[in-house]
Image (cartoon, rainbow, N blue to C red):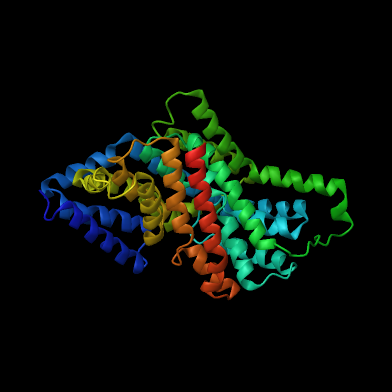
Amino acid sequence: MGLVAPSIAFVVSLGFLLVLLYRRVHIGITLNATALFLALLSLDWLDIPSVVWETTVEPLTIAVVLATFGVMLLSQLYKETRVIDSLSGSASKILKNSKLVSSVLPAIIGLLPVAGGALMSAPLVDSEAGKLGLKPEKKAYVNVWFRHTIFPVYPLSQVLIVTSALTGIAIPLIILRQIPVVIVMVIVGYIISFWKVTHLEKEADANSKTSSSLNSNLKHFLIAFSPILATIVVVIGVDAVGLGLANLGLDVVVATLVGILVLITISRPSVHVLVNPLKRWDVYAITLAAYGAFLLRKVTIGAGISNIFSTLVANGSMDVILMLTFIPAFLGFMTGSPSGGVAISVPILAGILTFSPATAALLYMSAYLGYVIVPTHLCFAFTVDYFKCSMHKLYRYIIPSFVITIVAALLVYFLV
């Protein structure tokens, strides 16, 4: 028996988690510390070592931790080899339209799942959006919103990998249901960003207008994009072949290994460049967060937290769809982490419903959107600081975008 009732243990542990996040403790440490704290409150202390051991040796946990490490290694190698500069630079030269460049480049750089990555695209957006005469808060909105349009359909998203592993739903099945929502995100973002903004063509010299220059830029783009493309193709291909690797979480592990090999082949980095990412704390911290998600799930299930919410549904106090939407969005917002929102929500909701592609996708989008709009979100903080705009002015554009997108997610859930 634990020290306190499950309901009290859950509330106290959530408060503990929020305190750690308020103190800016990394999400990897926070998830693991919260899991252990909840275990101390709700489980027999003699059972805690076995819970940790079972989580550690579970094949799915190992696979997702390895996949997360691989994705982070790939993203850091993209930065170290400067291939990301070639990717964004060639895309800018191909598009030749300030509206498109401003919206596409944050999404392209968003392919690198690094904390506060919006700061990487901010100078590019500032330059291109400046040609359109956008105010600082509009520039900030473009940078934040379009960066986050890519993740719901990006197979290498760590949050998507964790969601798939925890719910047991294959990544491609979740992505298929989120494509319409992402389309809505892009349309809404484009309208809010550029409504009644005068269209301007990028200035170009004589050489940039030639077909040979276009072909050269396209070639550079495809080469720079090939590691990511190879990784995505392998993920989809492995899942399509049906060898059971997706169920074991090994599809992304294999795919990221292929992506890293392709990146090494095209960039031919030195040993120093190859080793540098292994010295980065972020690589291990995000990997630790993946493990923490599984440990928190294990403890939450063992503590019987889901029984609290299943009782509320059984007596009619709360609607299942409301819980499927509100709980992940609330936790994503409060924790400032989509991984945290998903990791806590899945075991809570597991006692109420059976996960399907529809429920997994709605849960993901709810947690993700809750995270996107939280002011403690690093992309938010860095972008506001860079463009020197007030938070409340940025929220005038973010909140309507959030509402429309969550409505779109609900419509997809009910209609598709």
Whole-percent x, y for residue 83 in the image: 63, 51
Indicate left or right for 300 with 271 as reference. left
Residue occupying image coordinates x 54% and y 32%: 236
Residue 154 visible in the shown view: no
Indicate left or right for 127 with 172 as reference. right
Q: Is residue 360 above or below residue 130?
A: above
Q: Nearer the viewer, residue 138 or 277?
A: 138
Give the residue furthest to the front: 316
Whole-percent x, y for residue 212 in the image: 85, 46
Whole-percent x, y for residue 345 in the image: 34, 48
**Number of marks in the image?**
0
Residue occupying image coordinates x 51% and y 50%: 407
Residue occupying image coordinates x 31% and y 44%: 349
Q: Nearer the viewer, residue 297 or 320?
A: 320
Give the residue furthest to the right: 206
Indicate left or right for 108 with 380 as reference. right
Q: Is residue 231 above or below residue 407?
A: above
Q: Is residue 117 above or below residue 47?
A: below
Whole-percent x, y for residue 141 in the image: 59, 64
Find residue 263 and report its image quarter: top right
Residue 373 visible in the shown view: yes
Find residue 384 and report its image quarter: bottom right
Find residue 132 and report its image quarter: bottom right
Q: Nearer the viewer, residue 244 or 407?
A: 407
